[in-house]
Image (tube, helix red, strand yellow):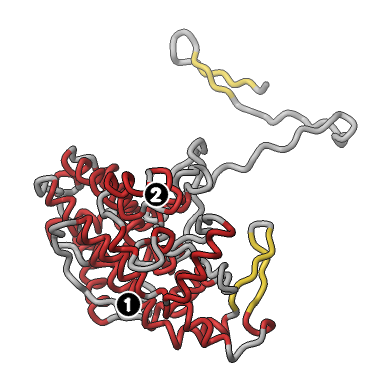
């Protein structure tokens, strides 16, 4: 690992800081972890989160979705620890943001990543949302807090070599956090680990980051080991997406790499879920444990909802959620309507066909005039007893 860090430091000095091009865990991984976190909440919170499960899961990828519009968003998802020190970076990095900024400057921190402090900032926003009994804000900040906590569990979010681009392993980020989970989710083991209140949330997220950093050597080395059985022609495949030709690892290579590193990916996903739930629980605790029932209509789960929750909890315990296709991430997402799109009918009703395109007189075929339809009109006389019929 020492040799790798030294080479990364030299390469980083030459090419400068690079922001991750891929999204941690991909949409699939983020949404799967967030859903499982809901199952690990205590009953006092679980009903509320389960009622809003689809929205919390969907919004857990919102931070990635706004990266193209918000230039400041990207650095909230990672922290390049090996930039700050080639050896023992965690001993040299202050955990509090102000102390770290005094030592390295705030600009440097924002350039090389702020994920631990973004987690705490988002957690504090969730505390305020709970205190204010703001349902919409609770859902939004719960989803975003989940996203940032989950990002901290990705080893490649702790290094300047985030995509293997400095070690001739470009594409490793997408392989590790997206391709493998999507391909092998049914083989992963998710445990129902109950959430617990975090005594020191900042220390907790730093511990997560330090563990992720410890997996870096295996992440890179096992890719090199798997590569020995492949040629460039069999190791990679090419696809055309978003108007660009992209190179990615082949499915055959993903299978070989998964045999070596799959347990690591499984472990990071499995341990991320209870940490997300614990951050939610801690925020709720810091807000004074508000009763979430009044924020629900009706204030308790309906029988159908309770039956569904019980079924999913049993599937989690039996580790068949993915096999039974009960993860929302496994379902195709419906098209989201534009905010200014107005329906002319209730949901489920067919909209009327659009009006025909106007035509010029020369384009309009000449038709023989038709006789007007006969319509009978009945009227009453002044006395109210006479009836007359006319045919216009």
Q: Marks 1 and 2: CB-CB under 8 Å? A: no
Q: Which mark is residue 253?
A: none
Residue 244 location in percent, x, y? 68, 60
Looking at the rendered structure, the secondary structure element under dot 1 is: helix
Can residue 344 be seen here? no
Q: Identify the residue shown where x is 60% and y is 73%.
A: 168
Q: Residue furthest right?
A: 362
Q: Nearer the viewer, residue 343 or 180?
A: 180
276 horizontally vs 214: left or right: left
Instruction: Pick the residue in front: 342 or 344.
Output: 342
Q: Which mark is residue 267?
A: 1
Query: In the displayed image of the protein, which residue is found farthest to the top?
Result: 382
Label 1 Cα crowd, 10 Å radius (few <14 / some 14-19 / many 20+) = some
Q: Nearer the viewer, residue 190 or 53?
A: 190
Count residues near mark 2 (Cα–Cα under 10 Å), then give few for <14, some for 14-19, many for 20+.
Answer: some
Q: Residue at x 37, y 49 (%)?
A: 104
Q: Nearer the viewer, residue 340 or 280?
A: 280
Q: CA distance from mark 1 to mark 2?
A: 29 Å
How far across and how far down the image is residue 390, in percent?
63, 20
The location of residue 182, given as percent across then percent down, is 46, 73
The N terminus - image quarter: bottom left
Q: Tell me the residue that label 2 is attached to.
A: 109
Would you say 260 lies left or right of 274 here? right
Name the residue rendered at 24%, 56% in the picture. Answer: 49
In the figure, is residue 387 to the left or right of 76? right
Placement of 280 over or under 290, stated as above or below: below
Q: Give the mark nearest the N terminus, 1 or 2.
A: 2
Residue 226 visible: yes
Residue 330 lies in what quarter of the image? bottom left
Residue at image point 67% right, 29% down: 374
């Amino acid at each position: 690992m020492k040799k790798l860090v030294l080479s990364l430091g030299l390469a980083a000095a030459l090419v400068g800081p690079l922001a991750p091009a891929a999204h941690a865990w991909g949409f699939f991984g983020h949404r799967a972890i967030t859903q499982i976190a809901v199952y690990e909440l205590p009953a006092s919170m679980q009903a509320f989160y389960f009622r809003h499960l689809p929205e919390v899961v969907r919004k857990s990828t919102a931070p990635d979705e706004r990266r193209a519009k918000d230039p400041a968003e990207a650095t909230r998802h990672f922290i390049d620890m090996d930039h700050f020190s080639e050896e023992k970076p965690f001993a040299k990095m202050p955990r509090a943001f102000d102390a770290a900024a005094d030592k390295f400057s705030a600009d440097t921190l924002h350039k090389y990543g702020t994920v631990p402090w973004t987690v705490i900032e988002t957690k504090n926003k969730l505390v305020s949302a709970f205190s204010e009994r703001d349902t919409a804000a609770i859902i939004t900040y719960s989803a975003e807090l989940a996203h940032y906590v989950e990002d901290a569990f990705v080893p490649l979010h702790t290094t300047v070599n985030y995509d293997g681009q400095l070690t001739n392993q470009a594409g490793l980020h997408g392989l590790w956090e997206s391709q493998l989970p999507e391909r092998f989710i049914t083989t992963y083991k998710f445990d129902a680990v109950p959430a617990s209140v975090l005594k020191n949330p900042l220390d907790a997220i730093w511990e997560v980051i330090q563990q992720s950093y410890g997996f870096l050597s295996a992440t890179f080395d096992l890719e090199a080991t798997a590569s020995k059985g492949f040629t460039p022609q069999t190791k990679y495949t090419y696809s055309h997406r978003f108007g660009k030709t992209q190179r990615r690892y082949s499915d055959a290579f993903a299978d070989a790499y998964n045999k070596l590193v799959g347990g690591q990916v499984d472990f990071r996903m499995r341990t991320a879920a209870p940490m997300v739930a614990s951050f939610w629980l801690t925020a709720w605790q810091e807000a004074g444990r508000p009763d979430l029932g009044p924020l629900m209509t009706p204030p308790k789960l309906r029988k159908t909802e309770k039956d569904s929750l019980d079924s999913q909890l049993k599937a989690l315990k039996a580790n068949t959620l993915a096999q039974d296709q009960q993860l929302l991430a496994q379902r195709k997402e419906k098209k989201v309507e534009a905010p200014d799109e107005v329906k002319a009918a209730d949901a489920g009703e067919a909209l009327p066909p659009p009006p025909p395109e106007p035509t010029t007189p020369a384009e309009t075929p000449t038709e023989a005039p038709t006789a007007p339809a006969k319509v009978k009109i009945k009227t009453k006389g002044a006395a109210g007893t006479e009836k007359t019929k006319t045919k216009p």
